[in-house]
Amino acid sequence: QADEVLAWLGTLAPELPGWVLDDAYGRVLSRPGLSLAERELLGVAALALMGLSAPLASHVRGALRNGSNAPAVSDILRACRGLAPPNAQAVIDQALQRLDRNVLRP
C-alpha cells in the first residue's frame, strides 16, 4: 500500500513523500542493528501508545508481512495497553480485535 500512503502524504505537503522515503524509511529502516520485523514491532508500540489508529493498522500489517507473527504483535499491543492513556487504550483494543478476527482465528 506504499503508493496510496505516499499519495496521501503528498496531499498533506508536497515534500513529505520524499522525506518519508529518504529519511524515515531510507535511513531509519535500512540502518543496521535491528531486523525489519523488530523495527515494525517498535513502530507498533509507538503508534499504539499515541493512539494513532490508521498508522497503527498499517504497521501491524507491516510487522506481520516482515517476519513477526500474530502472537508477538498481540503481546506488544497488550504490553502497551497498560501504559497507554484511555484514548490510546481504545485504539489498542480495536487493533487487538482486528488482529484476532483476521489472523488468529482459523
Image (cartoon, helix red, strand yellow):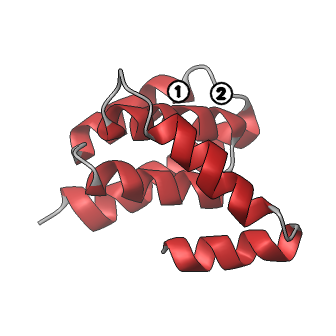
Q: Secondary structure at mark 2?
A: loop
Residue drawn at x 35%, y 20% as measured from the top left: 33
Residue drawn at x 35%, y 25% as measured from the top left: 34
Q: Along the horizontal axis of the image, is 28 left or right of 105?
A: right
Q: Nearer the viewer, residue 62 or 88?
A: 62
Figure quadrant of residue 9: bottom right
Q: Along the horizontal axis of the image, is 89 left or right of 45?
A: right
Q: Along the horizontal axis of the image, is 77 left or right of 73?
A: right
Q: Give the tally of numbered discs.
A: 2
Up/down of 32 relative to 37, above or below: above
Up/down of 87 relative to 80, above or below: below
Q: Position of residue 90 (x, y in %)?
A: 63, 46
Up/down of 11 relative to 73, above or below: below
Quadrant in the picture for the C terminus? bottom left
The numbered mark at residue 80 is: 1
The numbered mark at residue 25 is: none
Residue drawn at x 70%, y 61% as measured from the top left: 18
The amino acid pointed to by label 2 is: Ala
The amino acid pointed to by label 1 is: Cys
Q: Nearer the viewer, residue 19 or 106?
A: 19
Q: Residues within 10 Å of mark 1 (few under 14, many from 20)?
A: many
Tell me the residue that label 2 is attached to: 84
Q: Do the residues under discs 1 and 2 have CB atoms within 8 angstroms?
A: yes
Q: Residues within 10 Å of mark 2 (few under 14, many from 20)?
A: some
Residue drawn at x 66%, y 54% as measured from the top left: 20
